[in-house]
Amino acid sequence: MTAHSHSHAQAHSCTIKTVAVAELAAAADRAVQINPLNAPSIQMVRALGMPAEMPVQARLSVLTKKYWGSKGVKLTVGFMDSPPADLRARILSHMNAWGAWSNVRFVETKTNPQVRIARTAGDGYWSYLGTDVLLIPANAPTMNLDGFTMNTPDSEFYRVVRHETGHTLGFPHEHMRKEIIDRIDKQKAIAHFMQTQGWSEQEVIQQVLTPLAQSALIATAQADPTSIMCYWLPASIMKDGQAVSGGNDINALDAQFSGLIYPGPVAPSCIWPNGKAYFFKGKQYLRYDPKADKTDAGYPKPMAGNWPGFPTTFSNKVDAFVLWGGGKAYFFKGKQYLRYDVVADHVDPGYPRPIAGNWPGMWPEKIDAAICWPGNGKAYFFKGDQYLRYDIAGDKTDAGYPRPIAGNWPGFPADFAAGVQAAAVWNNGKAYFFKGSQYLRYDIAADKVDAGYPKPIAGNWPGFWPGGLDA
Ligand SMILES: [Zn+2]
């Protein structure tokens, strides 16, 4: 058994809290109020892979019951106790990790928070599901993060906070999928969870052995044992003796799925669902690990052969690339661009295409840099000493652009205002701009370059090309 699995065994299993039966009708009404015109389309139901034997109306009503609606999720968050500011910020940052892929945003407040987090010892990890959160009395928590402190390992913030936040977004347990439940030895599972979690037989049946169709709502087309919403099931309770690995972070399918059901403006970063960032220079690319703050071993590598579907013109050099919402990335080269499917790990069919005619208001060729901006639903594109602001939902350049960089990006020195070569934004509230052998860090909330920049790439970006990059 790996150390990773061992930590699961010691940890509390997560439970989904359900509202009382008498409140279910109210829950449905509430969801319809929130989501009056957003009853999921048949296409969405198909895309979500609801069980075929379930009548369409039932599938719709189940979905509608806890789904926040296609306009996205904006919720305020508060704490039942008084965690220190650094812990509150850390929890919020992991909740908002979903917002890199979907129209989801959590904002801390002290006044009437909608999501209320407790850290009650012995109460385990749990959350209410989707719009049920709004039915809970204002003096009661909607999520419990048993014993979380700043000393809790970082991996647990990824595994637990992101998972419980998934429930708040309406995502059920992935291990409740019938194809996984069918593999569980029911008697062994009951004994196991009664012993390790202190659950009653009824609770084990409800939490682990009831297939999704009867207990929950929204899911991807196939069961995904590495989904953040799937937890570890030990080999000892599986009929086939094969443990279910469970997820440790939002994976590519989770990311894509969240963007499908909550589309629209995202709080993007340049960090891919595998936790890595990619940079490009000439025929090469490198993979950067933001957590370790260094280039992964074995990089740079040639683009050719490692980016399936890239035509030679692109694998020889790209001008710019931007990680978009919904599991897509766009690469620009000369007069063309291509769309890359992050989950399928392949260029989408029908690409490259001409920039002209497909990006209203965009320069038709030779883009220098592109970046999706957190918080405003916009992307910025740079060419020479100009930049333009692109509205992601409206799919067009905003009126009044392009504009000069100079004067509009506070703190940009003259050589950066004359043009940038690459840009990246991480989920720490900072954006990075690269020009020649230097880079600068931009504070998104303060809307200006941080003090002390630009700095040399060499020595600050381990494994980078010291002379600069293309994208
Ligand atoms: Zn859970």
Image (cartoon, rainbow, N blue to C red):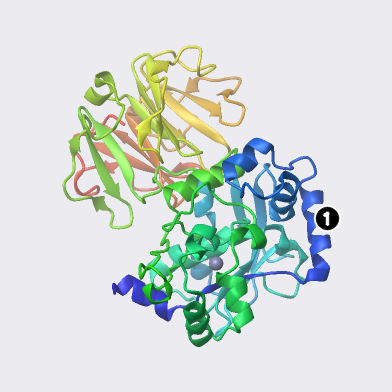
Left or right: 384, with 268 as reference point: left
Number of numbered discs on residues: 1
Q: Residue at x 30, y 26 (%)?
A: 310
| Image quadrant occupied by the C terminus | top left
Q: Position of residue 58 (x, y in %)?
A: 74, 50
Q: Is residue 54 above or below residue 142?
A: above
**Which of the 4 quarters of the picture holds residue 440?**
top left
**Which of the 4 quarters of the picture holds residue 235?**
bottom left
Q: Is residue 64 above or below residue 432?
A: below
Q: Residue at x 60, y 74 (%)?
A: 205
Left or right: 305, with 414 as reference point: left
Q: Position of residue 393 (x, y in %)?
A: 60, 31
In the foreground, 332 or 107: 332
| Image quadrant occupied by the N terminus | bottom left
Q: Position of residue 52 (x, y in %)?
A: 62, 46
The kind of residue on which mark 1 rests is Asp
In the foreground, 311 or 264: 311
Left or right: 260, with 141 as reference point: left
**Residue of label 1:** 29
Any part of residue 82 in sight: no
**Which of the 4 quarters of the picture holds residue 383?**
top left
In the foreground, 313 or 452: 313
The residue at the far left in this view is: 298
Q: Position of residue 126 (x, y in %)?
A: 59, 72
Left or right: 383, with 2 as reference point: right
Where on the image, by quarter, is ligand 1?
bottom right
Q: Cβ of disc 1 within 8 Å of ligand 1?
A: no
Q: Residue at x 49, y 87 (%)?
A: 195
Crowding at mark 1 (Cα within 10 Å: few <14, some 14-19, many 20+): some
Q: Secondary structure at mark 1?
A: helix
Any part of residue 114 in sight: yes
In the foreground, 307 or 429: 307
